[in-house]
Amino acid sequence: MTVISAIRDGLGRVRRAPALVAGVWLSTLLLALGPAVVLHSQIEAHLGASLMAETATSGVNFDWWNEFLAQASGVGQTFVPAMLGFAAVLDNLDRLADQRPLPPVLAVLVAAQLLLSLFLAGGLLDRLARDRTVGAAAFMSACGVWTGRFLRLALLVGPVYLLLFLHVHHWLFDDVWEWFTRDVTVERQAFGLRLALYGAFTAMVCAVNVVVDYAKIRAVVEDRRSMVGALVAGWRFVVRHPAKTSGLYLLNLMLAALVAAVYFVLAPGASAPVLAFAVGQLYIVLRVIVRLQFLASQTVLFQSKLAHAGYVAKPVPRWPDSPAAEAILRS
């Protein structure tokens, strides 16, 4: 199977699972709803019935905005110009690339999002691997089964990410950067070196991501209980198929970049808040589709090499039939 075929088949699996897209999007929306309500209350309390409220509703009023930020606390401190439109995407990338610390409130939200993703990962992979409807009960059961196992996997690979972001990043962007730019007088040379360092660091992070992705896929498809075994199996699969696994990952990254580029072109300014919200939610839906496409296409590639399409180790139990009865029906 070629990587193009894996992309096509992966998109087909996502297209046949609209409930997954809707469910993941809704979960992210509900996660952000609480902080949004708190922020709305803070803005409403600060504006009151003042004349500033009228100008704020008709457009961007930076004088009021700066005044609000000067006295804001908690969620209110996240209400900055960088949260508008495509600027939010660039701000997130900049924080990740240069390791700028998150405000405490955002750190809590990011941690909650990571935990939610950890919980949903097993159910999503199980559904995409089967490529057929499994029902809400079976989906939630798969989420519950794999949460503990994937938590153990996270504890195994966590030190690797810490090594990359705390030590390798420091070495590249402090020591190596300082050593190579000590005598550089041309700005474009320094800029080119910075881009090269970003590329090298991103490649290392992506390499770890690829192994972890296939470890999760092998764990779910083969019903592995040992996460050490799954991690080793994921590593073996990547080593045995380096061109296809890396090429597929690169194409999926390009698809994500294409979605971000479309959002950059279409994202309206702050003068159209309703349209900005609608376009922003559409972008989030497309990001969910791209993330599911990542998982689906990688699962398709693995199943084309080591397991037949639609295979997972445990059949879905359907009352009153046993798993064995369902296996007979499928055959």
Image (cartoon, rainbow, N blue to C red):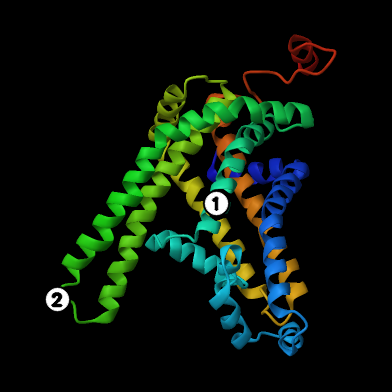
Horizontal and vertical percent for residue 7?
60, 46
Out of 142 and 266, give the one closest to the viewer: 142
Q: Residues within 10 Å of mark 2 (few under 14, many from 20)?
A: few
Quadrant in which the C terminus is drawn: top right
**Left or right of residue 243, residue 302 in this image:** right
Find the residue positioned furthest to the right. 320
Q: Mark 1 or mark 2: which is in front?
A: 1
> Where is mark 1, residue-wise?
108
Q: Is residue 304 above or below residue 25?
A: above
Q: Amino acid at mark 2?
A: Asp
Which residue is rendered at x = 44% and y = 59% of the image? Answer: 96
Name which residue lies at 71% across and 73% down: 45
Above-or-below relation of 234 to 275: above
Q: Which residue is mark 2?
A: 183
Relative image position of residue 3 (x, y in whole percent): 54, 44
- Residue 274, percent across and down? 77, 73
Q: Secondary structure at mark 2?
A: loop
Viewer-side residue, 50 vs 214: 50
Amino acid type at mark 1: Val
Q: State whether residue 260 is above or below residue 267.
A: above
Q: Is residue 44 left or right of residue 208?
A: right
Q: Earlier in the sequence, mark 1 or mark 2?
A: 1
Q: Give the residue drawn at x 70%, y 44%.
A: 14
Would you say 264 lies left or right of 104 here?
right
Residue under the image location 48 percent in, 63 percent down: 93
Task: Tell me how far mark 1 sits from mark 2, CA to CA.
Answer: 42 Å
User: Where, quadrant-wise, is the N terminus in this rendering?
Assistant: top right
At which x and y percent is residue 321?
A: 82, 12
Give me the disc on residue 308.
none
Kind of element beneath mark 1 = helix
